[in-house]
Image (tube, rainbow, N blue to C red):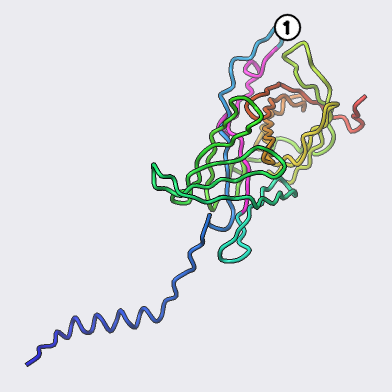
Amino acid sequence: MRIINWSIAAGILLLLFLSGCFVIENQYSGLPPGPWRAILKLDPVPVIPNPRGEPLPEKVNLKFDEVSQGQLPFNFEVIYDNKEAFHIEIINGEQRIRIEDITLGLDRQTAKDTVKIEFPGTDAYIRGIFEENVLEGEWVVKDREDYAVPFVAYHGQAHRFTTLRKTPDMDVSGRWEVTFGIDTEDSYPAVAEFEQNGNNLTGAFKTEQGSYRNLEGTIQNDKLYLSAFDGINAYLFEGKILEDSTLIGSFRSGKHYKALWEAKPNPKAVLQ
């Protein structure tokens, strides 16, 4: 006589029933789709020389408590064209840069998924290991000597600098007369234009040598932050609103250039 274990049979029937009720989601062949927040970890800012004996930012409390110093954030989105192929769009304000040259592989030493993102028209790329919704590696620019910057990106994050919403001390929208290199003998003029909407801030700096455009960031109390990244260039601006409604700040271009700047509002500011 065959003995039937009705509890086991009932369990099997239940599993079969449930398996017919659920649909397994499609597994993507590459990076998960949607928003990503990336950070370039620039070298720590060294002690800045002061040949003219003028006040430096540390003397006027130019500190950025809400944002980790030396970290340049930017955003990108992973978009699938079909189940197998996807591209990346780097976001700087209203600008979107489409990147299609993406290579997936496997790291033999770690047995983890690897991603290489190459930027069109340049010899720059991002190479990293993807694990648990985090892509970590480095940004490399081959035509610059010893130029590799640590990089990390987090899936599902859409903010740029911070999620804080501190009330801005003032609206900085408009045109500003700027001087770069205020701590050196080689200062030079610039013009800045900002557009502020609550805590959101976009802008551009124009100099005689060129422009830093499509900057996006935030303003929190008396601090402002702006950044832009296009694959070959990485710009980071940090600033502080002073009591006289002028600005003082720092500028970094990748890890190879640093400068201090000051600005005063001037709706008629132009480069001579």
From this viewpoint, which residue is outermost toward the left?
Answer: 1
Quadrant of the image occupied by residue 47: top right
- Callout 1 crowding tier (Cα within 10 Å): few <14, some 14–19, many ≥20: few
Image height of 6 relative to 39, above or below: below
Residue flagged by tag 1: what amino acid is it?
Arg
Quadrant of the image occupied by residue 127: top right
Quick one: 79 or 57, which is closer to the camera?
79
Residue in the picture at 66% in, 48% down? 90
From this viewpoint, which residue is outermost toward the front?
Answer: 108
Q: What is the x, y in percent for residue 67?
A: 57, 34
Image height of 237 relative to 117, above or below: above
Quick one: 240 or 236, which is closer to the camera?
236
Tell me the magenta residue range: 55-77
Q: What is the x, y in percent for residue 212?
A: 77, 34
> Does residue 217 appear anywhere in the picture?
no
Number of marks drawn: 1
Look at the numbered disc 1 and give the secondary structure of its residue: loop
Q: Is residue 111 left or right of residue 87?
A: left
Q: Quadrant of the C terminus?
A: top right
Residue in the picture at 74% in, 23% down? 261
Quick one: 40 or 103, which is closer to the camera?
103
Q: What is the x, y in percent for residue 124?
A: 64, 38
Q: Quadrant of the N terminus?
A: bottom left
Q: What is the x, y in percent for residue 32?
A: 53, 57
> Does residue 250 appear anywhere in the picture?
yes
From this viewpoint, which residue is outermost toward the bottom?
Answer: 1
Q: Is residue 63 magenta?
A: yes
Q: Is residue 213 magenta?
A: no
**Residue labelled with disc 1:** 52
Residue in the picture at 75% in, 18% down? 181
Image height of 63 relative to 37, above or below: above
